[in-house]
Image (tube, rainbow, N blue to C red):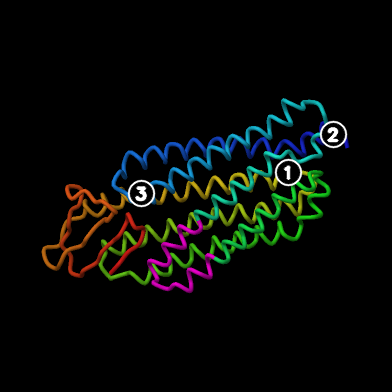
Amino acid sequence: MSESLIVEDVMQAALSGTLATMLLYGVTCMQTFHYWQTYEHDRKTLKFMVLFVWLLETAHTALSIHFVEYYLIIHFGEVAHLGLAVWSMGVTCIIGFFIGYVVNLCFIWRISRLGQNRWVAICFAAAATIRCGFGFANCILSFIYPLWTDFRVRVYATMVAGQILSAVVDGVIAFTLCYYLRKRRTGMKRTDSIITRLQIYSINTGAITALFGVLAVIAFVYLPTTTAFVAFVQVQGKLYATSLLTSLNARKRTMEKIEQSAPVPEGVVLSLFRSARPDPSCLETIEVQKSIAIDIHGDSMDS
């Protein structure tokens, strides 16, 4: 194989993945800024989690840039280095898997609040932990076996199993959220329209992260001479953070949609959005026929 083809196989997908992660990092920064400007009364634990995810995303992006620089700038023209996995690539993937794990746990917590079923949440958390363990193991093996050909042989089973499990976990979490949201339907048009929006969002976020998990498996199995699977794993980590921040920032739009609805003149109070330290001046009530509490700051719905 010529040198130009080797460079293309190793770096084309990796460079594309890094450019995509940089784009998504910009989206993450805007989402984080919007969150801090809009939800100043959120729980401190939630604020800390957002800050923590943003810091991880920053490190993830910086390391993604580093391993591209390592191949294309620092060791430009040195084809021998293209056969070795640089340390920053493994660390980048570790951070991405950890971000996915944190986001999975957040959505699992929502399921536990919606369904009031601890055992379902425990099973999902165990599956997410196993999936994260597969990812960490693969990254550690990249340090032990830095030669790409050796690495592929050593991690073939765990890579395929881990990414398939990732897609399954994301899909099942999305389906379960939709199921419990559907059980919250009341038959009232306004409330049901909000639940429908939440269901659509849950399906979309779960489907897109699951899709990239499947694409990573396909690239790993059917494109053995390239690093295309690394690009999909990189982008998948960014999509987890984006999905979490989007769900948090969407609460204000949901509240505004409710407030724009004309109140029904009979019934009792619909309590809108709660936080650890709510600002009473920001909370309003709407009269409806059935008592329902929609907890957006807690990311759950209680009836």
- The residue carrying pointer 2 sits among few (fewer than 14), some (14 to 19) or many (20 or more) residues within 10 Å by Cα, namely few
Cα separation between marks 2 and 3: 49 Å
* Residue 171 sits in quarter: bottom right
Residue type for callout 3: Lys
Q: Which residue is mark 2?
A: 80
Name the foreground residue: 8 vs 37: 37
Q: Which residue is mark 1?
A: 227
Q: Which residue is mark 3?
A: 44
- The residue carrying pointer 3 sits among few (fewer than 14), some (14 to 19) or many (20 or more) residues within 10 Å by Cα, namely few
Q: Are marks 3 and 1 in contact (CB under 8 Å)?
A: no
Cα separation between marks 2 and 1: 16 Å
x, y percentage for residue 84? Answer: 79, 39
Q: Is residue 116 magenta?
A: yes
Magenta span: 104-125
Residue type for callout 1: Thr
Describe residue 265's horizontal placement relative to residue 200 as left or right. left
Q: How many marks?
A: 3
Cα separation between marks 3 and 1: 40 Å
Describe residue 102's horizontal placement relative to residue 7 as left or right. left
N-terminal label among 2 and 3? 3
Instruction: Look at discs 2 and 1 and give the one toward the viewer.
Output: 2
* Residue 226 sits in quarter: top right
Name the foreground residue: 196 vs 250: 250
Q: Main secondary structure of the magenta part?
A: helix
Dot 2: what SS? helix
